[in-house]
Amino acid sequence: MIQYLYLGRVDYSEALCIQEELVALRTAGRIGNVLLLLEHPPVLTLGRNANRSNILASDELLAARGVTLHEINRGGDVTYHGPGQLIGYPIFDLRSLRSPGASPPGLGNRLGPVDFVRLMEEALIRLCAEFGVPAGRICGLTGVWCYLRRGHLQCGRLLDESCGTEDKDAPLGERKIAAIGIHVARGVTSHGFAFNVTTDLRNFTLINPCGITDRPVTSLENEIPGPNILPTLESLAHSAARQFGQVFSQQVEFVESLAALRAHAQASAERAPEPPAPAAPDPDLPAPEFPAQDTPLQIPPEIERLRHRPRGVKDRPVSA
């Protein structure tokens, strides 16, 4: 089962502390798999493989825009988080998950980190499809990408015959709608994805997103066809959780608050049986005696006769 909760807008430092707490609880087996869904104030995060040169703005400009900076232990390069972006932090134990279509049990069916990322991408691709937005993967690049086609309304401009190649169905370009980066420790994941919904895309000019310079970013607001009304982030969070449940073949359960999740963890700890205490020795029984390990062993005469030894010839004692 996947338990999920929507926290609204949460400061990035606070979200890191929440993740650490839930990772410890998941590692101890006091909670199940949890999907945190939330939104951040403007922040840049630098992953383990980040190159500082991919931050294009000066410290003064970042401060003027209220953008904070954090170096973290997830994979990937630099990423922007901000208002209008759905953030997902799956705290999952990979050992509890199986590859799609695999018949349990079997160690070979367990998910690895790369498989886990691919399934996260699949969940977000399906989320895009709910709104009529074609999306997919690009070989060698982690994340979810939208494909622009003729007849698609992009930023108020209709893309028509003059905008592309001869093939009417050929993609006109790939634009990144979701970034993904995770960390795995003792089989438990943290960090996750950032899905652009109504994000102010101008803030991505502060960086080379994920170190990629030849493909732009986009948002659901930009990509959604027609006059459809965008859902709220909270409503979209419920849709994202449902897609995670379908992709990972798990039931999903909404949890109202962190307090409720912590109460569940506490109840789980109280129900856990304590290990049995060693039995006390019976005072009426004599204490067992064990011979020393170096007690010599004399070969019995019967064995000597079977071995056709002459009478009176004895072997030297051997150690037991």
Image (spheres, helix red, strand yellow):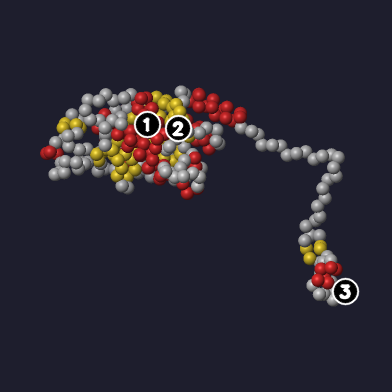
| Relative horizontal placement of residue 115, taking residue 302 as reference (left or right) | left
| Relative horizontal placement of residue 159, taking residue 57 as reference (left or right) | left
How far is disc 1 from disc 3 in space, using C-alphas?
Answer: 89 Å
Q: Quadrant of the C terminus?
A: bottom right
Q: Say what secondary structure mark 2 lies in.
A: loop
| Relative horizontal placement of residue 197, taking residue 248 as reference (left or right) | left
Please give the count of numbered marks on the rendered protein: 3
Q: Nearer the viewer, residue 259 or 44?
A: 259
Give the image location of residue 274, x and y in percent: 65, 34
Amino acid carrying mark 3 in the image: Gly
Give the image location of residue 100, x and y in percent: 41, 42
Can residue 55 be seen here? The reply is no
Q: Which disc number belongs to residue 224?
A: none
Amino acid carrying mark 2 in the image: Gln
Give the image location of residue 273, x and y in percent: 64, 33
Sequence-earlier tag: 1 or 3: 1
Classed neighbour count for the residue bearing mark 3: other residues with Cα under 10 Å, few (<14), some (14–19), many (≥20): few
Sequence-earlier tag: 1 or 2: 1
Give the image location of residue 169, x and y in percent: 19, 41
Q: Residue at x 32, y 27 (%)?
A: 84
Q: Nearer the viewer, residue 292 or 1?
A: 1
> Comparing marks 2 and 3, which lies closer to the viewer?
2
Residue matched to label 2: 251
Whether 282 is drawn above or below 65: the answer is: below
Residue matched to label 3: 312
Q: Residue at x 16, y 41 (%)?
A: 168
Residue matched to label 1: 240
How far is disc 1 from disc 2 in space, using C-alphas?
Answer: 13 Å
Q: Residue at x 26, y 32 (%)?
A: 132
